[in-house]
Image (cartoon, rainbow, N blue to C red):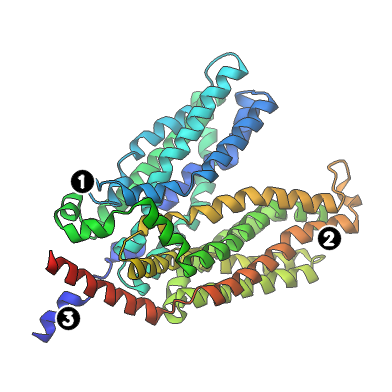
């Protein structure tokens, strides 16, 4: 009898396929969005030949609307009636099939005037983001749905981060080389559309792979609705969602601390070219740097499953934040030695790989806390809130970088060898000092505000399961 009881109460563990391959869809998603990251501006200026005012409108407005609506997807998924294949899994396939159409057409110019073409591009650029956000949010949410223990959540998050970082290597083969082949076949006018369409088809296939591997880990729509207690827990109102956020101190502190991670990522990515150009005086070093950090980010994401299991996700992120900050501050001290700087920033990027992996698991822990406290499962909403610090950091980075360059008196007219000490120090401020300070603040916020040790999360999960059984027995 004792063995039977244990088999009933023991949480279902994730399969080996999920443990090692959940994240293939994220790699494909990153490849799809890389087309825009690397080629959107060039396409609009050089191929579509839009005016600068139209391009500024397109890039600014689509980014702003995307940032301001980032929070709605998880809330809607949590609040509407579940679809056939489950509340979350269904969204991996529900609208993704439309994405390739939008991603193809956002690189096709229609009309002879800027006004008509801009309206066309705006519709498909914004529509493409709107459509892909549903699958992206559901994909993140499944970590808290499929993984029933903190260790499994760390493993899923680690796998997802590992494959996401693998996209950097995949892009080196599927980016520029593949575009060159497509240009030779379809001409430059249609090559970007073909590349974007192909990458978005890979995303559809990748998320379908996630859909299949997670089969059986979530109730279908029919199963959820048939169980009144489950249906009541799973469906949330606006008030429930707001409570899940504002009465959840660990979640609020995590969102603030997560902003530091993303600002580190965007600030370093956007500033490092200035370092190699004006301080190292060797732009060619950037290629070696990019290869090194891509490799270390993959290593960091993969080993995080072992470190997180040993230390817990919370402790791992705090320690990594402090190591990253120390590496950046040391790089500031040795900023005149380029290879020392490359080494130290690469150490920080290794830590970033760990943090990127563990942060999703921490959001899942915050979702457990929310359900334990309120009795409502707001996993989709809470996991979707990861988009807020990401989008905010992407927007803030540009303003901070511009301010730092202005402080140093930066001018593109200045010859690289004539850059002043003030200008070099301003570059270091943006590349090393500000990200380091933000990481230290983020570590302190997590230390004080995210008080969910692994043992407490496991206890809350047990209490939630006991409550569920009691509620279902009472129906």
Measured as percent of width and height from the top left, residue 225 is found at 18, 52
Classify mark 2: helix, strand or loop: helix
Residue beneath the point at 14% across and 54% down: 226
Residue 211 in the image: above or below residue 187: below
Instruction: In the rendered structure, find residue 6 and report the number of the disc placed on it.
Output: 3
User: Is the Cβ of the residue at disc 1 closer than 8 Å to that at disc 3?
Assistant: no
Residue beneath the point at 49% across and 26% down: 185
Q: Is residue 65 left or right of residue 278?
A: left
Classify mark 1: helix, strand or loop: loop
Instruction: Please state, as top left, top right, bottom left or bottom right, where the C terminus lies in the image.
Output: bottom left
Q: Earlier in the sequence, mark 2 or mark 1?
A: 1
374 or 296: nearer the eye? 374
The residue to which callout 2 is attached is 425
Q: Earlier in the sequence, mark 1 or mark 3?
A: 3
Instruction: Please state, as top left, top right, bottom left or bottom right, where the N terminus lies in the image.
Output: bottom left
Q: Earlier in the sequence, mark 3 or mark 2?
A: 3
- Alpha carbon separation for disc pair 3 and 2: 61 Å
208 or 228: nearer the eye? 228
428 or 365: nearer the eye? 365
Q: Residue furthest bottom?
A: 2
The residue to which callout 1 is attached is 84
Q: Is residue 14 left or right of residue 295?
A: left
Q: Residue furthest top?
A: 112
Residue beneath the point at 25% across and 48% down: 82
């Amino acid at each position: 009898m004792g063995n039977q009881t244990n088999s009933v109460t023991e949480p279902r563990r994730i399969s080996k396929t999920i443990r090692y391959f959940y994240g293939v869809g994220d790699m494909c998603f990153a490849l799809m969005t890389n087309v825009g990251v690397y080629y959107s501006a060039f396409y609009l200026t050089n191929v579509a030949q839009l005016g600068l005012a139209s391009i500024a409108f397109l890039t600014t407005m689509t980014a702003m609307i995307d940032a301001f609506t980032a929070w709605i997807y998880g809330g809607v998924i949590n609040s509407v009636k579940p679809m056939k294949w489950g509340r979350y899994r269904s969204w991996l396939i529900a609208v993704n099939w439309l994405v390739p159409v939008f991603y193809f057409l956002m690189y096709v110019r229609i009309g002879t005037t800027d006004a008509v073409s801009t309206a066309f591009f705006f519709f498909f650029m914004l529509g493409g983001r709107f459509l892909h956000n549903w699958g992206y949010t559901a994909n993140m949410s499944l970590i808290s749905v499929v993984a029933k223990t903190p260790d499994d959540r760390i493993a899923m998050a680690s796998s997802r981060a590992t494959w996401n970082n693998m996209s950097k290597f995949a892009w080196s083969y599927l980016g520029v080389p593949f575009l060159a082949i497509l240009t030779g076949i379809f001409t430059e006018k249609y090559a970007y559309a073909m590349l974007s369409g192909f990458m978005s088809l890979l995303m559809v296939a990748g998320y379908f792979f996630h859909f299949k591997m997670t089969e059986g880990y979530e109730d279908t729509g029919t199963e959820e609705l048939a169980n009144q207690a489950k249906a009541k827990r799973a469906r949330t109102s606006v008030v429930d969602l707001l409570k899940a956020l504002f009465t959840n101190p660990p979640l609020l502190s995590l969102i603030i601390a997560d902003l530091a991670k993303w600002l580190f990522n965007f600030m370093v990515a956007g500033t490092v070219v200035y370092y190699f150009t004006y301080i190292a005086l060797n732009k060619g070093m950037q290629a070696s740097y990019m290869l090194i950090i891509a490799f270390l980010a993959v290593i960091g994401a993969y080993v995080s499953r072992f470190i997180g299991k040993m230390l817990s996700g919370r402790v791992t992120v705090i320690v990594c934040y402090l190591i990253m900050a120390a590496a950046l501050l040391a790089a500031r001290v040795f900023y005149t030695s380029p290879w020392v700087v490359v080494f130290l920033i690469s150490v920080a990027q290794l830590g970033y790989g760990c943090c990127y992996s563990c942060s999703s698991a921490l959001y899942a822990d915050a979702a457990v806390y929310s359900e334990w406290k309120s009795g409502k499962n707001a996993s989709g909403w809470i996991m979707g809130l990861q988009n807020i610090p990401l989008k905010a950091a992407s927007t803030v980075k540009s303003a901070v970088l511009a301010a730092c360059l202005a402080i140093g008196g930066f001018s593109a007219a200045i010859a690289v060898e004539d850059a002043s000490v003030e200008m070099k120090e301003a570059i270091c401020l943006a590349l090393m000092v500000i990200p380091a300070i933000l990481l230290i603040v983020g570590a302190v916020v997590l230390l004080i505000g995210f008080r969910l040790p692994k043992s407490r999360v496991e206890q809350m999960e047990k209490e939630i399961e006991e409550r569920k059984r009691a509620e279902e027995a009472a129906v």
